Amino acid sequence: MSTLFRQTCLQVFKAQHLQFQSKAFEYLEGVFKENEVPEEEERTALLYIAREYIKQNKAGIVTRKKLKQVVTSLQVAKTQENNPENDEESFDIDYDKFFNVISSFDMPRIEYEPSIKNFKSIEKHPRFIGDETSRSILFKGRYNLLIQRLLRNELFSPVRFDNTDSAKFHLTSIKDLRGRTQKEFLLFGMLTKINEGKYYLEDADDKIELDFSEMSAPSSICTSHSFQLVHGTYNEETEIFHASYIGNPPVEKRSDTRNAYGNVDFLGIQKQTTNESLLMLYQEKWQHIMFVVVSDVWLDQEQTLDKLRKMFKEYHKNGMTPFAFIFIGNFSYEPFKLGIGQSRRYTEMFNTLGELISEFENIANHSHFIFVPGPGDPYVGGALPYMPIPERYTSRFKEYVKKAVFTSNPCRIQFLTQEILIYREDLIDKFHRNLLLRGSNNNPDCYYQEVIKSIIDQSHISPFKLSVRPVYWEFDHALRLYPLPNAFIMADRFPQYTFDYTECHTLNPGSFNQGTKVQWMHYYPARNFSEHW
């Protein structure tokens, strides 16, 4: 094959942090010749193989043996896809094999390291009580993650042809402003406001005071300690940066993140041994699989149990056994307060729920039940992530329900190729009370969309200063939306909504009890789609 093929091959695999052994290249060259791959399709095919190699192996040296295994698995998947009449028996498999619930406290601590231009695992086990260094690393970690994402964006990343820089925007560090007065610059850093009402922007090296007096409304809502792009001019005499624009950094699609860092296991679970092409095929076949999402399940209210019984009866009547029930706190209308009476009451609440579910044998034995605590549940503490509800309250419940998991808030679910983030917080209200700058969209009906956009743009579920939303410093990595999940269950007291933004489907089930009415949602992971109930 041509020298151009060799160059294309090396470019594609190098971009995925992979390097070829000569025998591996010879093998791949032979595969492309044998299959007569058109020249215009070579790059796409190479990228597909490179991504699959990373999923099945760690990044590094590409050997002939491992590459052959990858290519063979792709060919098998293609054969099965082209012969659906022979597939029925192969899909009669255990769905649970592809279902994982990941607690925030089980996720690996992975940080972006600028010196190697890649992510690395922090071997030191995170602590609940860190030192001041941990606090500074928290914001440094958020900054490093966003700046690498920003610099890989096509608007900021230069692609050079004939030594011509094609980037549309260029970032300037704050320290490089000195001596360059009355010129326009684009900065990126953390937005803060001190007591006397002065705004500052802080990057990795320095900080500078901001003046917004001549700026129109921001393009997005801004909170203290969020990270913002700021365009304007610098006055060296006053050492003030006069802003003409401020807005969130552009979001990065999940697919783009995986293309860049497909070898990084952000969730800390063993990689699926099943080829992703087959997983996608399973998704096509398993479109009926459904998660039931319910929030504010107040088990201390008799009407809640009555309504849950009616809900289970309806599923039973229609012959439906949902794959999973995601129950989200608070699980008590009255916030939990430590005491003998309260502990006994909480245990009895879950015992009663277990007895109720056991009345519906198929659901009790086959459906998964995932419990995510709210801010009013036992021992969650004042900082994120919240601990799971202690086993002392749930041990008997697990005797009634075979597939029950009590996990953290936030937590994640992986099912087939889908990643789902679940978070319980009255986030709309918290944003409203802690805004520094309001966006240009003043439509109250769209406010929830502005909040979700801001969270996704920031790649963090809590872009606030720590006094507003305390965080366990060394667990901040578990609060990030990076890579962007396929679905984001944002349980809030705010009315139900769904919102799609940059390959991420967001849904809020609302509160289960609405007077005489109830509300919950169905989520179909294979379709990344939800519906109101």
Image (spheres, rainbow, N blue to C red):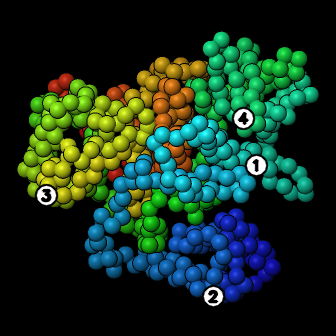
> Mark 1 highlights which residue?
157
**Pointers 2 and 3 in contact (C-beta within 8 Å):** no
Question: Which residue lies at the image location 72% right of the left edge and 47% below the top edge?
Answer: 151
- Dot 3 or dot 1: first in sequence order is 1
Look at label 4 and name its amino acid.
Answer: Asp
Residue 128 x, y percent position in the rendering: 45, 42
* Quadrant of the frame with the C terminus: top left
> Mark 2 highlights which residue?
34
Query: Which mark is nearer the camera, 1 or 2?
Result: 1
Question: Which residue lies at the image location 86% right of the left edge and 57% below the top edge?
Answer: 161
Residue 385 x, y percent position in the rendering: 42, 40
Count all numbered tags in the image, as a single digit. 4
> Mark 3 highlights which residue?
362
> Mark 4 highlights which residue?
203
Please tell me whether mark 3 sits on a helix, a strand or a loop.
Answer: helix
Taking 514 as reference, is 437 left or right? right
Residue 233 placement: quadrant: top right
Look at label 3 and name its amino acid.
Answer: Asn
Q: How far is disc 1 from disc 2 in space, using C-alphas?
A: 37 Å
Query: What is the crowding at mark 3: few (fewer than 14 residues within 10 Å), some, or many (at least 20)?
Result: some
Query: What is the crowding at mark 4: few (fewer than 14 residues within 10 Å), some, or many (at least 20)?
Result: many
Please tell me whether mark 1 sits on a helix, a strand or a loop.
Answer: loop
- Dot 2 or dot 3: first in sequence order is 2
For the residue pair 76 and 482, the one nearer the viewer reads as 482
- Dot 4 or dot 2: first in sequence order is 2
Look at label 1 and name its amino acid.
Answer: Ser
Question: Which residue lies at the image location 62% right of the left edge and 69% below the top edge?
Answer: 59
Residue 75 x, y percent position in the rendering: 51, 80
